[in-house]
Amino acid sequence: MTPAPDRTAEELLKGIWRENPIFVQVLGMCPSLAVTNSAVNAVVMGLATLAVLVASSTLVSLLRRFIPAQVRLSTYIVIIATFVTVADMTLQATLPTVHKQLGAFIALIVVNCLILGRQEAFASKHGVKLAIADAIGMGTGFTLALTILGSLREVLGNGSLFGFPLFGDHYEPWVVMILPPGGFIMLGLILMTFNWWKERKQAATAGGAA
Amino acid sequence: MSDPVAPEAEKEPSSPVLVGTLTFAGLMSGLLIVGAWQLTLPAITAHKAESLKATVFEVVPGAASIQRLAWDGGALVAKEAPATQQGPAEPVVYGAYDQGGKLLGYAVPAEGPGFQDTISLLYGYDPDSKTILGMRVLDSRETPGLGDKIFKDLAFVGAWAGLPTETVPVIVGKGKKTEAHQVEAISGATISSKAVMRIITTSHAEWTPRLPLRADAPAPAPSAAAETP
C-alpha cells in the first residue's frame, strides 16, 4: 500500500489536535503534571520530549526490519534511554538553570509512555518519512499541551508568564495553581472544556445529517 | 498496514541473534553517550564553576572576593585550579574576604549520599565563632516534591545560618527544636534532611583542624581581590 499524497501531512497533524497525546490520549501524565508549574519549564520539557521522540522514531523505523520481535521492547528502551541521556547532558550544558528546575524529570522521559507507545504503535510499522511526521506531530502536540497547561498555571498561580509579571501589585497569586493539586485541577478543567467542545461539535454534525 | 509482517508466522530467531542485537544496541548506545559526554563536558564544568563561585558569596554573607585554597597536607595555600585535572582532586575550600582583604569565613564544598543520589553542597563556616554561616545545595536528585525541599524549603535552607558547631549539630523532628545546635527536619523528607546534616558534620570534622582562625588565614592572591561578584 503506497501512502496517499497527503498521508504525511495527516500523520503530522493528527498528533497536534485530533489525537493530542495529553488532551485526547491522556498519556505521559507524570511530566505533564509535575513540571508545568511555569511556562518555561513546560516548553523545555516539551521540546526535550519532542527531540527524543523524533530521534527514537527515526531510528526505530530505520531498524524495524533488523530488530527481532522478541527483543524489540528492550531495544526500543535502549534507544530511547540513549537519546534521553544525550538530551539531559545537552540541556545541562546549555540551560543549567532550567535543567536544575526540571531535576529528575528529564531523565524520567525514558519512562514516558508516549514515547515507547509511538515506537510500538507507529514507528516500528511504518517507513521513516511517516514515522518522523508522526513523531513531530505527537511531540508538537505534547509541547503545545504542556505549554497551555504551564502558561495557565503560571498566570494564575504566580501572576506572570514566561517570568514576566502580568498584573500589578494588587494581584494576589492563586498559589495552589503552581502546587501539585493545581496541576490536577487545571488539567481537569482543560479536559472538560476539550470534551465539551468535541461533543458539541459531534452533536452539531449529527444534527446536520439528520 | 503498509508493512504486513506477522511476527508469529516468522521463524523464531536463534538466541545468539537476540543476544547479538541487544549487545549491538548497547554498544552503539554507549558510544553515543560517551560522544555526547565529551562534547558537553567543558560547558557543564564551566557552568558548575561559575555557579560555585556565585554560591560562595551566598554562604558567606558580605564577602567581596574569594580565593581558592587547597590543602597540601600540612597547610592551606592560595592556589588557582589547574587547567587540566590530573590524579585525584586535592581537597579545596574557598576563602571569602571583605573589601579590605580580611577573611570573613570559609566556604567548604562537601558531598555525600542522599536519599537517591549524591548530594553536593557548599556551606560557609566562621572559624572564630565556630558557626555555620549558610548552606546551599549545589546538585541533588532527591524526590521531587519531598526531598528536593532541602533546597526549595527556605525555612530549612535558612536554618543553617548561624548554627553553632561546638556541640555537634543534629536534626530533630519538626517543631522539636529546643537548643541552638538543632535543625528541624523537613516533614516528609527526614532522610534527605539527615543526609544534609551528615554531609556537613562529616566534612566539618575533617576540615575544622585544617582551617586557621581569621587572623591566621592565608591572604588572598592579588588577582583574587579584583574578583568581585
Image (cartoon, rainbow, N blue to C red):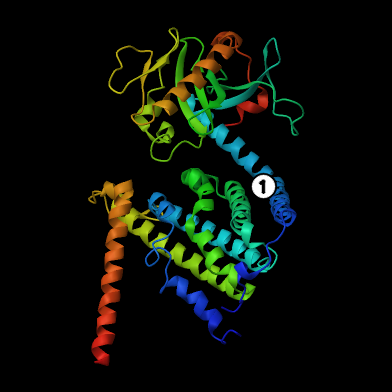
Q: Which residue is tagged 1? A: B40
Quarter of the picture holding the C terminus of chain B: top right
Q: Is residue A159 visible?
A: no
* Front-most of residues B55 and B28: B28
Badge 1 element: helix
Q: Residue B215 location in percent, x, y?
A: 56, 9
Q: Quadrant of residue A68?
A: bottom right
Amino acid type indicated by mark 1: Thr
Mark 1: few/some/many CA within 10 Å (<14, 14-19, 20+)? some
Q: Residue B167 location in percent, x, y?
A: 43, 7
Q: Which residue shows up at 33% across the image and 29% down it? A: B187
Quarter of the picture holding the N terminus of chain B: bottom right
Q: Residue B16 location in percent, x, y?
A: 74, 53
* Front-most of residues A95 and A187: A187
In the image, taking residue A200 as reference, residue B213 lies left or right, namely right
Q: Is residue A193 above or below residue B62?
A: below
In the image, taking residue A108 as reference, residue A178 lies left or right, namely left
Chain on which label 1 sits: B
Q: Is residue A73 above or below residue B137?
A: below
* Front-most of residues B143 and A160: B143
Tally of numbered discs: 1
Q: Is residue B164 visible?
A: yes
Q: Which residue shows up at 46% across the image and 75% down it? A: A14
Q: Is residue B32 above or below residue B195?
A: below
In the image, taking residue A26 as reference, residue B200 lies left or right, namely right
Q: Which residue shows up at 27% across the image and 21% down it? A: B175
Q: Residue A3 location in percent, x, y?
A: 58, 84
